[in-house]
Image (cartoon, rainbow, N blue to C red):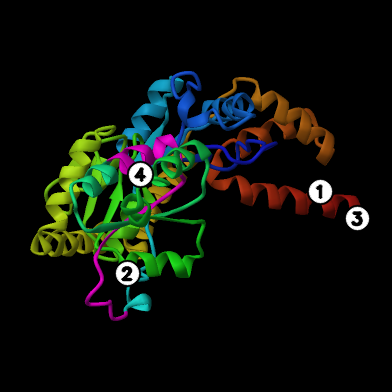
Amino acid sequence: MALRGRGLRARRSLPNRRLLHDVAADPERDRWAYRLLPDIAERLSLERHALARTRYLHGLTEAVLTKTISDHGLCPDATAVIGRGLHDRRGVMAKEREADRGAHVLFVGRLERRKGVDTLLAAARELVDDGVEVTFTLAGQNADNSFRDSFDREAATRPRLRAAAHFTGMVSDAELHRLYVDADIVCVPSRYESHGVVLIEAMMFGKPLVTCAAGGISEVVRAGHDAIVVPPEDPTALAESLRRLLANPELRAQLGAAARQSYERRFEAQSVARRMESFLEEVITAHRNAPVDSPDVRERLQRFLGKVLSLGPDDASTLAGELLQPPAAAFRVRRTQESARQASSA
């Protein structure tokens, strides 16, 4: 969600920028994603108030930016789409892999409906039933017990299925990086992602991806170039794409190499930082030149200055007008404070 803190106060003197990571305006429409949050109404209220005061919006993808503007009826002064950047960790974790181990598919994320874990487990059943030699590792918090419980009940009477899936729970960063190194394929079967950090992590480690055309995913990967993309909520299509990659090491290597190139070109931390710096410079310039929003700001500021600095009405009015010109405001405040201190000590 765009707003994660509480009790924040907007300051007119500073540019008000919001990073749009995952915004939901309608808890009823998205109830399957947010039903586990007991304070969702309060969170959404805070989100609406924060966005209503926001003049500059940064979205990780065009999809989440457009959705937010539409859902909240916003008219921002400036927007930018800049993806998430990650520091390269592949070299730190490089190691020899076991030559005789079977194929390994990795899922990273919370075990919940939005992440499509049920779709992945259904695809796993199809592949195991067809005799495909593959293991699945699911790394992440068990946010909804129903998926794991359902799988465990079925796997209790199916030894091959039970042996094919491993649930790690939450893992450390070092362990997560090791899992990426060991993976042959990374699968992201989400029903919705605003951006998808797992996609970037998989690219960083040069892994072929199988994912879904949902939310902003199609802006992160290029179907057929660095990933195979299937419709969400389609276990059969997911199983067929995994089967195709598992049977074709050359295609896996091709997609993995392209994924690594995509990371280096678009998502490496320094490259993203340069793009973000350019946007922030635009925001600062626009903010300095922006007109004052409220028509009574000058009058209120005049009264405040007259009281705090003991200025007459004319001087307070003149200073208020000068201070409402943002580029020189900080300098004029310091100059006035110094003059007031000198007058009081005389």
Camera-nearest label, 2 or 1: 2
SS state under label 2: helix
Q: Closest to the observer: 40 or 119?
A: 119
Residue type, label 1:
Ala
Left or right: where 208 falls relative to 146: left
Residue type, label 3:
Ser
Residue at 50% x, 22% y is: 27
Camera-nearest label, 4 or 1: 4
| Extent of the magenta region | 95-122
Image spot of residue 7 (x, y percent): 70, 36
Q: Which residue is mark 2?
A: 181
SS state under label 1: helix
Q: Callout 2: few (<14), some (14-19), or many (20+) C-alpha neighbours within 10 Å?
A: some
Inspect this view and state whether residue 346 appears. no
Q: Closest to the observer: 91 or 281?
A: 91
Inspect this view and state whether residue 210 appears. yes
Q: Which residue is mark 3?
A: 345
User: Upstream in the sequence, badge 3 or badge 4?
Assistant: 4
Residue type, label 2:
Val
Queried whether the magenta region covers residue 76, the answer comes back as: no
SS state under label 3: helix
Cβ atoms at labels 2 and 1 below 8 Å apart: no
Q: Which residue is mark 4?
A: 195
Mark drawn on residue 340: 1
SS state under label 4: loop
